[in-house]
Image (spheres, helix red, strand yellow):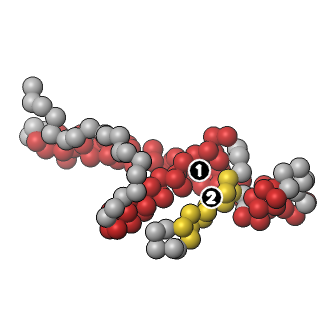
Amino acid sequence: MEGKKTRERQKIPMKKIESEDDRYATFSKRRSGLYKKASELVKLCNIDVGIVLFSPTGKPFSIFHPTSQAIIDRFLNPNMQLSETSSLVAAHARNKVNQLNNRKEVFDNIKEVASAQSLLLDNMKENGQRYWLL
C-alpha cells in the first residue's frame, strides 16, 4: 500500500501572519468559513447573530440575522421587546432564510446525485461497458 501523498490537516499556531499576501488570502478564506458557521448557528439554534469584521485593508464586512437594526437594538437593551414592525421584519427574514436553506439542501442533494452518476459513468467508460445504453 502506498503512503499518503498529501499532508494531513495541521494545527496552525495563533500568531500574526507576517506575509501580507498570505494574511489577505487567509482572511478571505476564514471570513467565508465564519459566515457559513454563523448561518449554521442561525439554522440549527434559531438564534440572532451579528458579526462585523474589518479586513487587513480596512474594508468592513458584516453578517446580521434577522436584521442589523434588530441586533443593535437587542445589544443595547437586552430586555427590550421588539416592536410589532421589527417582529414582522424578523419573522419574514427568518422565513426567507429557512426557505433559502431548504432550497440549498435540495440543490446540494441534486449535486450529490449528479456527482455519483458522473462517477459511475466514468467507471463504466474506463471498464469498456456500454454506458450509453443506460
Residue 15 in the image: state x and y as whole percent.
40, 52
Sequence order check: which comes first, mark 1 or mark 2? 1
CA gap, disc 1 to disc 2? Answer: 8 Å
**Is residue 16 found left or right of 39 in the rendered image?**
left
Residue under pointer 2: 51
The image position of residue 80, as x and y in percent, is 90, 54
Q: Quadrant of residue 75?
A: bottom right
Horizontal arrangement in the rendering, residue 112 relative to residue 3 (left or right) = right
Q: Residue at horizontal 56%, vertical 71%?
A: 60
Is 126 in front, or is 42?
42
Q: Which residue is mark 1?
A: 38
The mark closer to the camera, 1 or 2, is 2
Depth check: give the residue in front, 27 or 5: 27
Residue 5 got which mark? none
Residue at x 32%, y 68% (from the top left corner): 21
**Amino acid type, label 1:** Ala
Q: What is the quadrant of residue 125 in the picture?
A: top left
Type of the residue with mark 2? Ile
Residue at 47 percent across and 52 percent down: it is 33
Image quadrant occupied by the N terminus: top left
